[in-house]
Image: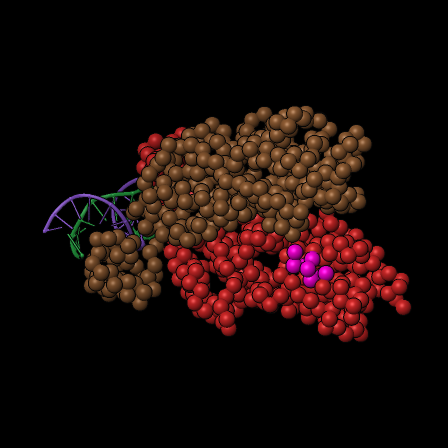
Chain colours: A red, B brown, C purple, D green
Amino acid sequence: MTKIQKVADLAGVSTATVSRALAGKPSVSPTTRARVETAARELGYVVSASASSLASGKTRNVGVVVPFFDSWFYVSVLKGIQRALADAGYDLTLYHLDPHVGEGGLTQDNPRRRRLFDEFLRRGRVDALIAVSLELDQAELDSLTDIDKPVVGIGGPLPGIQTLSLDDHQVAKLAVEHLLALGHRDIAHIAGDQDFEIDFHLPAHRRQGWESALAGAGLAAHPLLLRTADFTIAGGYDTTLQLLGDPRVRPTAIFSASDEMAIGAMLAARDLGRSVPEDLSIIGIDGHELSGFFGLTTVDQFPEVQGRHAVEILLHQLDGDRPEPGNEDLPYELVVRKSTAPPPPAALT
Amino acid sequence: MTKIQKVADLAGVSTATVSRALAGKPSVSPTTRARVETAARELGYVVSASASSLASGKTRNVGVVVPFFDSWFYVSVLKGIQRALADAGYDLTLYHLDPHVGEGGLTQDNPRRRRLFDEFLRRGRVDALIAVSLELDQAELDSLTDIDKPVVGIGGPLPGIQTLSLDDHQVAKLAVEHLLALGHRDIAHIAGDQDFEIDFHLPAHRRQGWESALAGAGLAAHPLLLRTADFTIAGGYDTTLQLLGDPRVRPTAIFSASDEMAIGAMLAARDLGRSVPEDLSIIGIDGHELSGFFGLTTVDQFPEVQGRHAVEILLHQLDGDRPEPGNEDLPYELVVRKSTAPPPPAALT
DNA sequence: GTGAAAGCGCTAACAT
DNA sequence: ATGTTAGCGCTTTCAC
């Protein structure tokens, strides 16, 4: 391995100067800098991450914690984070935290979780942390505050931590208002089920958005029009079969809490001989990569941009300024495609 | 920050003993070990990763390079890797390498790529590397050999490197033989297109498997029955529309080089009013999470297990034994579902 | 703008 | 089984 002393010798300067030059410090004369760079290149010198970290206290590495790998949304966020980090010359250490927790409490005695907070994050291997859709209990929050490293949460709010989050209530409301504007009045909702409530009550917020949009139009949320599924295509499919097969209700539109469930709903409708959007309108949330292919109307939440944005904030904090922790709303946008249209005339009677 | 000296003081031993005890070294008496562990817990002590790495030369961190985040297959492999690594107490640093390369050469002057090999992997931040579906040019191979750290490739073979790879030829042959056994003779193939050839010529190998299975049955591979797509559902859909709309051929079955394209094919067939499997059989490769939902017959290649297995091999190598680098074949399995059946009687005339 | 030298916090000989 | 001690390779005062 080539060490800094060799470079110093070749360049005819001290190791201190090599360190400064290679770190891009201003206090190095252009000539010296050039000589050092040439020497380093010639020798194929690369600083040792551990030696540098030990001496400087900085790792140029960011920890990222995600709850799932199976979901398009999380992987997209991760993708955005990784790209932005790589561009900034940072490494990314990936942690996974299973969100499934015990009864009653949020994290009670999940050993992997404890280990992540008590060990992995405290070894000083990262300069900062991005937590994606992670609801943290008080001990974990304390643990993070304790480490005293910048933390950005995607999904929030999280007390004492800088977070970015989607206003799920408004997003849902927008989706439902789109359907209302088309003339629909019997609008079903496929909500995320209980298991996902841990994620900042996302299912509840979207459901409430549905309810309040309906209320705004003077409509009640019929209990039978509210169904739940597990955020997968298969789950959306099954639930839609149930919904459309129930003779007690006749929805002309479905608002799904995610695009994947919405796609499942489209497939189910088709299998039941109902055409979309002629007989049934369907709208989702996400901006899933397949939404274009299926012609699904959706509210895009730009997951990749969310990841990028989290990194920007983090780098800022790493650059020195620690703003008041708070929550920032993420952008979203209605994307109208071919899965939504006015209800069939028959339904208007 | 709590340092090792404090623990040593509290436990009434030397720092060396603390280090040994916490590292689980055998040469520590049970009593001492217990005292050290208690002291460490009491103080909330965690070793500093950089100090430990600098002194020992080990990081307990593995680098993983993946070419895509958009594909279910790669994310599944990543998931397997991350789980296995976490279980072994290793961190995972994630790198992305865009496989799109310039004309003519494999990697010529892709700056991100150079940077990964010349810098990121040489900073000594990882103990070992897992390269997923990465075809490397000679300079890169040299670079890896140079670093002298264990490397395992998923997908191969890669000269001088331990690799795990699927026998694409045999897998494809198995898929086509399944169709032949059902009585099909006009079997189309949706191959991966040119852009994916960089990935160990996977499209070509699967295509050759198709051809050789046909040849084994005394059949020729009709050029019009060979189509290509981009490994996505949308791509498979479009290509299938072309294929089934072409009056010059009448395939009774489609062998798709991936499940995602196969799903696209199923959707296209349905949109054209062709029922699967009554009018048309479809088989894919992968074992995609959606294959069950769509009832797709496939050859499962257990991507998550691939990831796990790569980690096992790596940990072994990290434990000391460096076996002769070579290639190991990965397991696969035909999973028959509802998308394949005998051809319709009319086609037999 | 550059050099000398003192650590950063730990591990691994080497002793005992 | 445990202690002593010399680094690991770099960054950062502090001088000049």
Residue B119 location, quadrant: top left
Q: Looking at the picture, tell me which residue is in the foreground, A53 or B129.
A: B129
Residue at point 70%, 31% (across, down): B185
Any part of residue B178 in sight: yes
Q: Quadrant of the C terminus of chain B?
A: top right
Residue B77 is left or right of residue A206, and the answer is: left
Q: Quadrant of the N terminus of chain B?
A: bottom left
Any part of residue A167 in sight: no
Residue at point 45%, 33% (across, down): B327
**Residue C7 placed where, x, y %?**
28, 53
Residue B193 location, quadrant: top right
Residue A129 is left or right of residue A183, and the answer is: left
Q: Is A137 drawn above or below residue B133 in the view shown?
A: below
**Residue B139 placed where, x, y %?**
46, 29
- Answer whether residue A239 is magenta in the image: yes
Bounds of the magenta span? A234-241
Q: Looking at the picture, tell me which residue is in the foreground, B82 or B290.
A: B290
**Residue B277 placed where, x, y %?**
71, 44
Residue B294 is left or right of residue B113, and the answer is: right
Residue at point 36%, 40% (across, down): B317
Q: Is A210 drawn above or below residue B288 in the view shown?
A: below
- Answer whether residue A318 is magenta in the image: no
